Amino acid sequence: MAEVAVSRRQFLRGDVRGARAPLRPPWVLDEADFLARCTRCDDCAAACRASLIRRGSGGYPEVAFDSGPCTFCGDCAAACKAGAFKEVRGASLGAFAHRAVVGDRCLAANGVVCRACGDQCAARVIRFRLAVGGRSYPMVDVARCNGCGGCAAVCPVQAVAMRASEMAEAAA
């Protein structure tokens, strides 16, 4: 079983398993180092062309994919003067420590024709597998998912969530 690093803030709020870890901007350092270095200046949020980075809990930047996907432009990392980000590499695969997860509220899994997440996925990692009864269920190839959040942004019932992934940490 993988060991989960839990911040003091998560522990005090009762999240001892780290299940509600905030989604941080791409290319940030591991959580403890990020919190130690981030000055909460909002430079990364101001630099984000897609307006995905917002002031979150404790004033630290968090990512919300309600307006669209991350374009991996790297402007957020370049704007950080405190050194809270890793060096931006050309590939987007190691940028985020989370991947898409499709939940039970998914329309397609409940018999309604909806392929919004698959249509939005630029990396083409969401496929629909036909199940008994003619229903199709979206399957995410976590090894190839870059965590951009495009699928979460278009889901009409918010069934797609971004969750921490061991595979994402291995790619970083």
Image: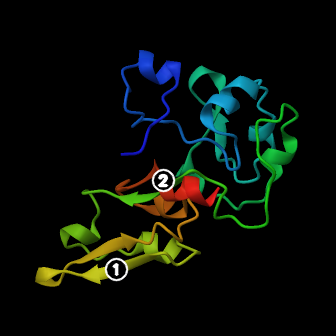
Identify the element where label 1 is drawn.
strand
As drawn, the residue found furthest toward the front would be 1
As drawn, the residue found furthest toward the top would be 12
What amino acid type should be assigned to the residue bearing mark 1? Phe
Q: Position of residue 80 (x, y in %)?
A: 83, 38
Q: Is residue 16 visible?
A: yes
Quadrant in the rendering for residue 43: top right
Q: Position of residue 136 (x, y in %)?
A: 25, 78
Q: Is residue 69 visible?
A: no
**30 or 161: nearer the viewer:** 30
Q: Which mark is residue 137?
A: none
Against 120, residue 168 (above or below) is above
Q: Check disc 2: other Cα within 10 Å, few if <14, some if 14-19, many if 20+.
A: some
**34 or 133: nearer the viewer:** 34
Are the two marked residues, 1 and 2, in contact with CB atoms closer than 8 angstroms? no
Residue sitting at 49 percent across and 75 percent down? 125
Q: Which residue is mark 2?
A: 166
As drawn, the residue found furthest toward the left would be 133
Residue sitting at 67 percent across and 55 percent down? 95
Residue sitting at 20 percent across and 67 percent down? 110
Q: Position of residue 51 (x, y in %)?
A: 69, 47
**94 or 26: nearer the viewer:** 94
Quadrant in the rendering for residue 19: top left
Gap in Å between the C-alphas at discs 1 and 2? 23 Å
Quadrant in the rendering for residue 56: top right
Mark found first going from the N terminus, 1 or 2: 1
> Which one is in front in this view, the residue at disc 1 or the one at disc 2?
2
Identify the element where label 2 is drawn.
helix
What amino acid type should be assigned to the residue bearing mark 2? Glu
